[in-house]
Image (cartoon, rainbow, N blue to C red):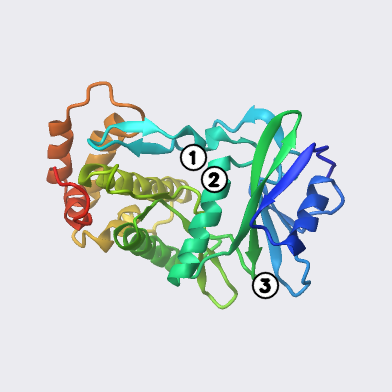
Amino acid sequence: MQDQQLDAIDFFAVPEQHQAVVRDWYAGRVAPLALDGERSVHLPHPAGDGRVLKLKGAGLSGNPVQFGVYHRTGPKAPVFDFEGRMMEDVAAGHDGAFRGGVSFQQASTEYRVARRLIELGYETVPCLGYGRIEKEGRVSWFSLFEHEPGLSGAMAYPQLPLDIWIHLNRVIGDLMFELAVKHDLIGYCWYSRTPDNRFLIRDLHPYRQADAFNMSQVSWVMQVFYAMHIRGNSQRLWALNWNEPAMPPDLHVWQYRAFCPDVRLEDHDELRHELVVPYMLGAPQDFVFERLLALLKRNRITAALMHACPTKFARA
């Protein structure tokens, strides 16, 4: 805990009663209750009733934000044009944030999407608002969340029992698919767990609003599949390290059962090699729309997404 010696701090939507503890954190006047990942801390709630404030963008591992030093980590944040070409949204990715901080886009989106999901009736970790801190002409951003008593972000096996981990890796697909189809919200997220085993949606900054004026059926499918691939691929890589015999070897594709009940492991493997690598990791060097379209219609997963895409998006 140390004074970050900021020149300014500004709040957007954060209730006034919660602003003082945020100011105290950045000024080094309050100790964290806990660290939460690389860029978040838990802080005392002013109500003192067991709730906790989580400040994302609080600094690097409990130390100050490294102004001028960018994260340079994490997956890219692609946007797919009307024909499915990949473009990178740098502001939406970790590369747009200083180490220990979050980007303007991440802070704003986290707040707006969390508020929207709560309005729609989804159990979601509340985001109270967001803000910015300034030092020597550079600006970093933060988001402020409210955790109910006992809320846990330790959501991976073996911290979770295997049966719960398997269940969550299936139903997350139901959630992501429903948000995309019913509410035009495309992205990936995860959960926090309450002591009574309720699961609250969190980590919403990768989301974007689908727009039928600027997206087609093809770009909608590309955006949805990329989001689900990023979330599922994390599970696939973790499982290799755990080497747990009881873990279903195809668990990372169970999320696709939400719209493709007969999905097979080889369907996903085909897309890893023929869609993700040439079309999603960077701007394609040799883009032919008809070739991409043929792949999307041929593969079992993307063909099911093509069918599920809302009809307001222009068909190819």
Q: Is residue 295 left or right of residue 213?
A: left
Closer to the eye: label 3 or 1: 1
State the residue lying farthest toward the right: 29
Element marked by disc 3: loop
Residue 8: image quadrant is top right
Q: Are marks 2 and 3 in contact (CB under 8 Å)?
A: no
Q: Dot 1: within a 10 Å radius of its alpha carbon, few (fewer than 14), some, or many (20 or more) residues?
A: many
Spatial CA distance of label 2 from label 3 is: 25 Å
Disc 1 residue type? Answer: Ala
**Viewer-proximal residue among 55 and 263:** 55
Name the residue beneath numbered marker 2. Answer: 106
Residue 269: image quadrant is top left
Q: Is 86 located above or below residue 242 in the figure?
A: above
Element marked by disc 2: helix
Can residue 100 be seen at all in this image of the molecule? Answer: no
Name the residue beneath numbered marker 3. Answer: 149
Disc 2 residue type? Answer: Gln
Spatial CA distance of label 2 from label 1 is: 6 Å
**Viewer-proximal residue among 134 and 34:** 134
Q: Is 76 located above or below residue 126 in the figure?
A: above
Q: Dot 2: within a 10 Å radius of its alpha carbon, few (fewer than 14), some, or many (20 or more) residues?
A: many
The spot of residue 139 in percent (x, y) is 67, 35
